Image (spheres, helix red, strand yellow):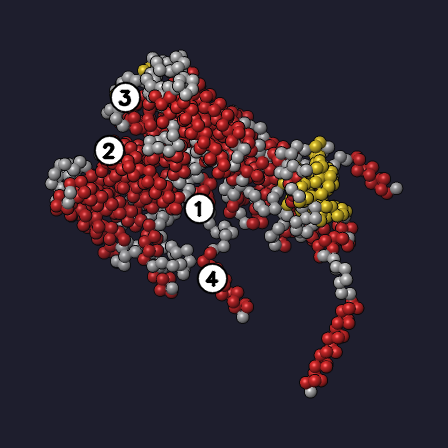
């Protein structure tokens, strides 16, 4: 009964993101194998997994940076074209694992670049400087400043992106991604290299983004961050989705613990053997001391 | 180590003299040099510029005189006289040292030139020896002045090298100027106008120099003089003013440039002016491609060639294979459109490549253009361009009955054909400046810079990388084609050999790229200044023609080592240099200290 009612509510809202059977092969190596993932409106979904599990590759498949070998990615029911700029135009924005800001542009300019898909002024309009150009430019600047206020970078709008401290560079990446007015925000390790305070601040920022109506899919290694934040968590191990569910389910799952910490191999010493060895050692020790006397 | 730290405190000068003695020495040297210019330096007039007269200075002596006068002015400002302090908002010791060095350089160069030209030191009159000695005394005195900067110039207290070297570097370093008193707007605009007036005068003087020795002497003093003004803080002031009144500064630059032909009696040097403008305009077009979008184009001169050939073919030249005669506006549109088409045709397949691959392919296409023009001669291909003969006798332009090939009197000043073309070209340059500026400060310009910075991130921001790169390529090509249409009429002959990858005469692809990099990538004034220098210096120093490319390479290496951002720094790069303490790059000299910490912890 409960399961049917769940599927019914699912049908009501079309998922923001529906990836079905996404497979990515590089030659003989299968980096991502038949992964299904859905993100519903207003959700924060976490994607975790050990290093090399294929999380970033999966992200790249979603955003059109890679063309998946098999499977399809749909945004609000329409299949996405495999071109990064068209994906962004459709409404998926992303940040990068290793920060990729436009280092020699100012903070404000970085966000203005993020507005690119939501503005239309072409070269002719820029050269003629028609009133419409000035209006659009003004509106873009205002919207960008709002985003900088939102992320707390407004006072630094004239600084070069490269001169920002690390934590603020991460925030600026999020502001730049939000500038394209996305329905879904993909965050690739947003707290990597941050101290606990900065991590808390990022957590609040992500929650605020969700409250504005943007769904979030986040890759992260910081488990506390993931389990505090996410409505659902998917675990990717060696390119395959191991499990998906609430924080509690995932945390309790033995396979997840095994994936992170490893499993004892067959014939690994049990507690009996350990006791036996210890006893033998103790015996030898006493024998040696007796000999000495 | 500790000795070094103590000796670099305060404002200790490179030479340990007392300030009073240093000032006195500088004053004696400078005034001695000033007087020496009124005495004969050599006995014969076979050295160009008459240096034999006792009583008034002549030729290169005038340059020394100017240097000495400027040094004196800054020496007087150093006494803190009211009403003169605005001349040196960042201190006077640096400017005095630079100017003394400049005077020394130009004077010793003159004496060396006399010795070499006339064959031996015997050709120097006592006046020459006095000049040599006094300028040296002035430099020694200037080296003993307390430095403007009080900061330790060393990257870290235990950096290697003798302390005197660092003291010299500190003496030459520029200090940020004190805060300017706010001026009324009219005074600021007046200051801009005067600055551009001086600039026009300096440029005109340089272009009008009649012999290479005078030009070199001028070049030495101007470079040091510029460094002195920079060290005095006046350049920073002027930059602040021009950024504040951007449009007025642009207008002033345009007016100053338009005044140039009116300062000339004949067409000898206006032709140089016209060629500089053509070169500068094409460099500015290339700056869209290289400076904004970051696409390294090594075959850019081909677009100038397309424009020039198109204009020559429709110019009504008797040798043109088409034999039509378009009015100039139509010829201009034809040239620009032909370049646009050519740009898109070359760009569409090549812009899928990145970095080095793109550079090689554009280099190839540049050469393909030149060789195609050579082969379209009737024997190895259809007869379109007359092969290596090119299209000669391009008729002079006539717009509304105004014949550009004739002499005219404008406002009572005689303006020759090159003067006419100079003024026409100036309009084209102004148009290109407008296009560049408006394109750069727009959504499209930002997208270009984003692609230059990180193409992957730019596409992830929704930028269609290929389309925007093609747009930059096409716009750059169109602007070059526009300049080409005028060039065809100025040179009156269009041949394939004008459009090589590298050659002794600018514009060619290598020199265009050099002008952009030398001047400052992504800036408006940079490529124009770079183009002016790169055209003027080889044109004036024709005796060095054999070594020109060697010297050119050497100059580029030195520039890249000491000022990689170019002569005019981009606003973004300026920000980069003015913001301190935020880089998360660890200071390398601290590492040994950390090493000690680790060993302690281990112990």
Q: Name the residue rendered at 66%, 45% in the picture.
A: A29
- Do tags 2 and 4 sit on the same chain? yes
- Do tags 1 and 2 sit on the same chain? yes
Left or right, residue B349 beside residue B538: right
Q: Position of residue A16 (x, y in %)?
A: 72, 36
Task: Find disc 4 in the rendering and name its residue.
Answer: B592
Q: Name the residue rendered at 34%, 43% in the picture.
A: B554
Mark earlier in primary sequence (2, 4): 2
Which mark's residue is nearer the viewer, 1 or 4? Answer: 4
Q: Position of residue B440 (x, y in %)?
A: 48, 32
Report the front residue among A185 and B562. Answer: B562
Tell me the SS state at disc 4.
helix
Q: CA distance from mark 1 to mark 2?
A: 37 Å
> In the drawing, what numbered circle is on residue B415?
3
Would you place residue B580 above or below residue A16 in this image?
below
- Do tags 3 and 2 sit on the same chain? yes
Would you place residue A118 above or below residue B322 in this image?
below
- Do tags 4 and 3 sit on the same chain? yes
Q: CA distance from mark 3 to mark 2?
A: 20 Å
Q: Could you tell me which chain the residue with mark 3 belongs to? A: B
Left or right, residue B94 beside residue A130: left
Task: Find disc 2 in the rendering and name its residue.
Answer: B209
Q: Position of residue B135 (x, y in %)?
A: 21, 48
Mark earlier in primary sequence (3, 2): 2
């Amino acid at each position: 009964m409960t399961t049917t009612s769940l599927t019914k509510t699912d049908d009501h809202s079309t998922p923001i993101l529906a990836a079905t059977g996404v497979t990515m092969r590089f030659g003989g190596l299968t980096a991502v194998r038949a992964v299904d993932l859905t993100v519903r409106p207003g959700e924060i979904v976490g994607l975790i997994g050990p290093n090399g599990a294929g999380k970033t590759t999966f992200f790249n498949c979603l955003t059109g940076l890679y063309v998946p070998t098999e499977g399809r990615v749909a945004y609000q029911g329409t299949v996405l074209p495999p071109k990064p700029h068209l994906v962004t135009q459709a409404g998926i924005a992303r940040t990068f694992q290793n920060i990729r800001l436009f280092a020699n542009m100012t903070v404000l300019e970085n966000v203005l670049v993020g507005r690119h898909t939501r503005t239309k002024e072409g070269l002719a309009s820029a050269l003629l400087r028609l009133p419409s150009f000035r209006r659009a430019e003004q509106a873009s600047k205002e919207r960008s400043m709002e985003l900088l206020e939102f992320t707390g970078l407004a006072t630094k709008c004239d600084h070069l992106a490269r001169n920002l401290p690390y934590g603020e560079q991460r925030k600026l990446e999020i502001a730049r991604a939000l500038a394209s007015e996305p329905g879904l925000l993909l965050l690739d390790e947003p707290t990597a290299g941050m101290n606990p305070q900065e991590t808390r601040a990022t957590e609040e920022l992500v929650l605020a983004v969700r409250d504005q109506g943007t769904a979030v899919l986040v890759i992260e290694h910081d488990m506390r961050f993931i389990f505090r934040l996410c409505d659902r968590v998917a675990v990717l191990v060696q390119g395959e989705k191991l499990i998906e569910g609430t924080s509690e389910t995932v945390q309790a799952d033995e396979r997840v613990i095994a994936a992170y910490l490893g499993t004892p191999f067959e014939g690994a010493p049990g507690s009996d053997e350990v006791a036996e060895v210890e006893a033998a050692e103790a015996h030898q020790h006493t024998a040696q001391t007796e000999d000495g006397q | 180590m500790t000795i070094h730290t103590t000796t670099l405190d305060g404002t200790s000068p490179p030479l340990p003299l007392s300030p009073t003695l240093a000032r006195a020495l500088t004053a004696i040297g400078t005034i001695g040099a000033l007087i020496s210019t009124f005495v004969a330096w050599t006995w014969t007039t076979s050295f160009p510029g008459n240096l034999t007269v006792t009583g008034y200075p002549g030729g290169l002596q005038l340059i020394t005189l100017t240097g000495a006068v400027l040094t004196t002015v800054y020496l007087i400002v150093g006494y803190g006289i009211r009403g003169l302090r605005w001349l040196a908002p960042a201190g006077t010791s640096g400017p005095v040292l630079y100017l003394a060095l400049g005077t020394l350089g130009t004077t010793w160069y003159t004496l060396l030139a006399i010795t070499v030209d006339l064959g031996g030191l015997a050709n120097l009159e006592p006046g020459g020896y006095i000049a040599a000695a006094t300028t040296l005394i002035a430099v020694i005195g200037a080296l003993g002045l307390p430095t403007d900067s009080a900061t330790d110039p060393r990257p870290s207290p235990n950096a290697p090298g003798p302390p005197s070297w660092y003291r010299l570097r500190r003496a030459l370093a520029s200090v940020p100027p004190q805060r300017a008193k706010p001026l009324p707007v009219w005074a600021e605009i007046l200051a801009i106008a005067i600055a551009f007036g001086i600039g026009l005068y300096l440029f005109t003087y340089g272009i009008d120099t009649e012999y290479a020795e005078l030009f070199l002497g001028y070049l030495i003093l101007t470079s040091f003089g510029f460094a002195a003004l920079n060290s005095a803080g006046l350049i920073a002031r002027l930059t602040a003013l021009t950024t504040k009144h951007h449009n007025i500064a642009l207008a002033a630059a345009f007016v100053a440039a338009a005044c140039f032909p009116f300062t000339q009696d004949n067409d000898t040097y206006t032709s140089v002016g016209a060629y500089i403008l053509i070169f500068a305009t094409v460099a500015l077009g290339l700056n869209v491609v290289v400076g904004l979008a970051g696409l390294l184009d090594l075959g850019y001169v081909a677009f100038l060639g397309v424009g020039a050939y198109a204009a020559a073919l429709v110019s009504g030249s008797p040798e043109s294979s088409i034999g039509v005669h378009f009015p100039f506006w139509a010829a201009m549109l034809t040239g620009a459109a032909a370049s646009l088409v050519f740009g898109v045709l070359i760009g569409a397949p090549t812009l899928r490549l990145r970095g080095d691959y793109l550079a090689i392919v554009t280099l190839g296409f540049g050469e393909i253009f030149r060789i195609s023009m050579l082969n379209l001669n009737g024997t190895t291909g259809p007869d379109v361009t007359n092969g290596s003969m090119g299209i000669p006798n391009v008729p002079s332009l006539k717009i509304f009955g105004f014949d550009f090939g004739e002499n005219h009197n404008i406002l009572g000043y005689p303006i020759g054909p090159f003067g006419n073309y100079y003024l026409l070209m100036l309009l084209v340059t102004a148009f290109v400046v407008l296009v560049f500026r408006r394109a750069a400060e727009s959504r499209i310009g930002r997208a270009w810079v984003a692609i230059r910075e990180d193409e992957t991130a730019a596409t992830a921001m929704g930028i269609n990388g290929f389309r925007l790169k093609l747009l930059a390529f096409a716009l750059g090509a169109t602007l070059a084609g526009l300049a080409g249409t005028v060039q065809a009429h100025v040179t009156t002959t269009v041949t394939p050999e004008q459009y090589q990858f590298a050659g002794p005469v600018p514009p060619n692809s290598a020199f265009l790229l050099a002008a952009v990099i030398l001047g400052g990538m992504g800036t408006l004034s940079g490529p124009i200044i770079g183009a002016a220098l790169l055209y003027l210096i080889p044109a004036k120093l024709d005796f060095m023609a054999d070594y020109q490319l060697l010297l050119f390479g050497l100059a580029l290496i030195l520039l890249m080592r000491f000022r990689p951002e170019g002569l005019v720094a981009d606003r973004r790069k300026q920000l980069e240099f003015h913001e301190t303490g935020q880089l998360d790059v660890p200071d390398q000299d601290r590492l040994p200290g950390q090493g000690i910490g680790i060993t302690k912890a281990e112990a």
